[in-house]
Structure formats: C-alpha cells, structure tokens
Image (tube, rainbow, N blue to C red):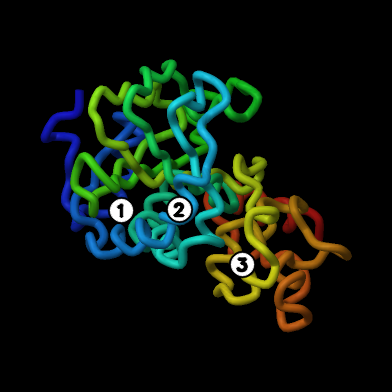
Amino acid sequence: MMTASTHVPATTSLAELADHPRRDGYVIVDNLVPGSLMDIIADESAPYLDATPMGYNAMIGRKSRRTGALVARSPGCRTLIGNPTILGVCKDFLGHAIAFQVMLTQVISIEPGESDQALHRDQNAFDFYPFPDDYHVQCNTLWAMTDYTADSVLLYSGKIVHSGAANRSQQVRRAINVNYCVGWVRQEENQFLSLPTEVARTLDDDLLKLIGYQEGAWAMGYFRDLEDPLRAIRGGNVAYGFDATKLNGHAGTAFADQLTHSE
C-alpha cells in the first residue's frame, strides 16, 4: 500500500529522488509537470487509443490496450520524456552505465472488466537474466491520465514486484508508461521502427540520443565506419567517433583507465 511517505514534492533533490527507488523500489513525485501537458498528450494520442487492439495474453491484458510509438505520435510526450528532473534521476540511478536510453513509451488503457495482472518484475523482459541485486538496469515512470493526480509521476525500479490491478469500475483507467534503461541493453520498444526517419530529422539531438541515436557503451551501437549514430540523421555535421569526454559513472572511469593503459 502506498502511504503519504511515498509522496514527495517536485522540489526534492535529484539525489534524494534517486535514493527512493534504490532503497524502497518506488516513489511518487507530486506536481512535476503542468496538468495541461497531460491534456495535450491525451488529445494527441486519442486517435490511436481505440485503434490499438486488446492484449493477446493475460500478462499484457486481454482487456487492456498498450498504445506505443509516442515519440512519433505525440509531441507533448517528447516533452514528458525529456523532463529534466526525470533525466536527472535516471543519470543518478543508472549512473553505473556509460549511457541510458528510452526503453519504451506507451499509453496503457485498462478497460472495465480487466482482471489482476500477474505479479512480475519489469527487468524480466531481458530474457529473465538474473541481474545482481545492486545492479539496476531500468528506471521506470508511470504518469497518470486518470485516477490520481495527472501532473504526478510514479518512479520505480525494474526490480520491484508489481502488477496492474483489476478494473472493477465502469471507466477506462489510463496512464503513460515511459521506461528508461542502461544504454547497452536492447530496448523493449524498437524506436528505430516506431519513429519514421523524416520525423527523426525534426527532433533535437538530445532527444535523438535518448531514443537510441547514440553509442550505448564503448563499441556498442556505432554506425557504419565506427561513426556516431547521429550521423545517420545529421550527416557529416556530427563529430566522428566515440566521445570519451561524455562517459558516465564508474564504467566511464574504467574506460578512461583502459585508454590510459593502451597508450
């Protein structure tokens, strides 16, 4: 059960915000974005929601819809994805990796009559790999569109055991799910197929890197002749090769040490 102690104000420091999911598994940050932004996203995603088919098994939800490709479909969701507080928490929480990225974007619509989802951990998506207890591979967010304050967000780790509750009401229950993961794992939602190239060219570099146009770690995800993946979108205007000055966390320290011993 979530209590008042699991709610914190948006003014809470990034370090404290990151400590909550690390220690407790989750935290709710109140009033993090304007409610008007959630209204914009609801309007932009509306044409796609009813067109999304119901889930094909009990885990996904036979009376639930999961509408993805939000980077392509909702400019408002791009703002949500790039929220500075959320990205700051991700940098802290996933700082043991060189980079982090968007794992998935979706509007989850739980229809009336849906049953309880089975308890699970989101990190099981990685082929049920037994990550060490102290290694976090995901930092997840759930933004309410209905039910509780629509400008607040649930931050939770990929390790926490949870499920979608049954919908015993007569109303559709909706939330926006945006998950982030370390840069060296495969994304759950294939952003390169979900986002048309012509739309990608209109986005800023920071968002492009966040959805995967970056090297997720040393020598992982490079483009063509060991080039920066952004070159696929921006051409020769992007610097060649891996930028070691932007390394993050202890992995960056280890990489720098490796370079030193290679000289």
Numbered label attached to residue 152: none
Task: Report the residue at 72% width, 83% height from top.
Answer: 237
Image quadrant occupied by the N terminus? top left
* Disc 1 residue type (three-letter): Leu
Q: Residue beneath label 3, please?
A: 245
Look at the numbered disc 3 and give the secondary structure of its residue: helix
Q: Secondary structure at mark 1?
A: helix
**Relative to 63, residue 45 above or below:** below
User: Which residue is the site of mark 1?
Assistant: 14
Left or right: 19 in relation to 117: left
Residue 91's disc is: 2
Image-based side of 55 in relation to 31, left or right: right
**Which residue is situated farthest in the bottom direction here?**
237
Under mark 2, the amino acid is Lys
Q: CA distance from mark 1 to mark 2?
A: 9 Å
Which residue is more in the foreground, 154 or 53? 53
